[in-house]
Amino acid sequence: MGEICKSCGLPSELCVCEEIAREQQDINIYVVKRRYGKMVTIVEGIDANDIDIDDLARKLKTRCASGGTVKGDTIELQGDHKKKVQKALEELGFKGRIRD
């Protein structure tokens, strides 16, 4: 028998806590101009207590083929990748909103 989820009490195979946490996130995606005219895509609004933000950042960096970092509860990706990030987040079960 597998492990039991501490939040809902169901076996880990049946647990939907992370799915629910993904659906409840209000994620904003926008681009800012940094030093020397470089564009940076910012993904914010992720609750790091419910979601593994480092793993999510790794997946987004791979999908966008760019570098990036995690600063607090935000993910910063090098370059303008708003559309790619929104599509990747939707495929992972999040609801990302592009902000201008």
Image: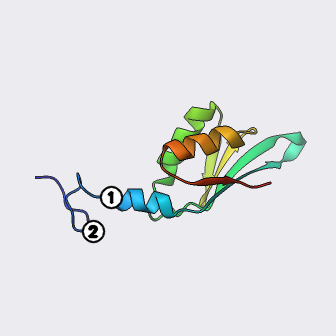
Quadrant hosting residue 72: bottom right
**Residue situated furthest right in the rendering:** 36
Check disc 1 and report the residue beneath it: 16
Which of 8/6 is in front? 8
The C terminus, quarter of image = bottom right
Kindly indicate whether the residue at mark 2 contacts the one at mark 1 (C-beta within 8 angstroms).
yes
Q: Above or below — where is 94 with respect to 8? A: above
Where is residue 8? Give x, y as percent.
Answer: 27, 68
Where is residue 37? Give x, y as percent.
Answer: 89, 41
Q: Residue at x 57, y 33 (%)?
A: 63
Inspect the image, locate mark 2, and give the three-letter code of the amino acid beneath it: Cys
Inspect the image, locate mark 1, and give the three-letter code of the amino acid beneath it: Val
Which of 20/61 is in front? 20
Q: Residues within 10 Å of mark 2 (few under 14, many from 20)?
A: few
Check disc 2 and report the residue beneath it: 8
Residue 82: assigned label? none
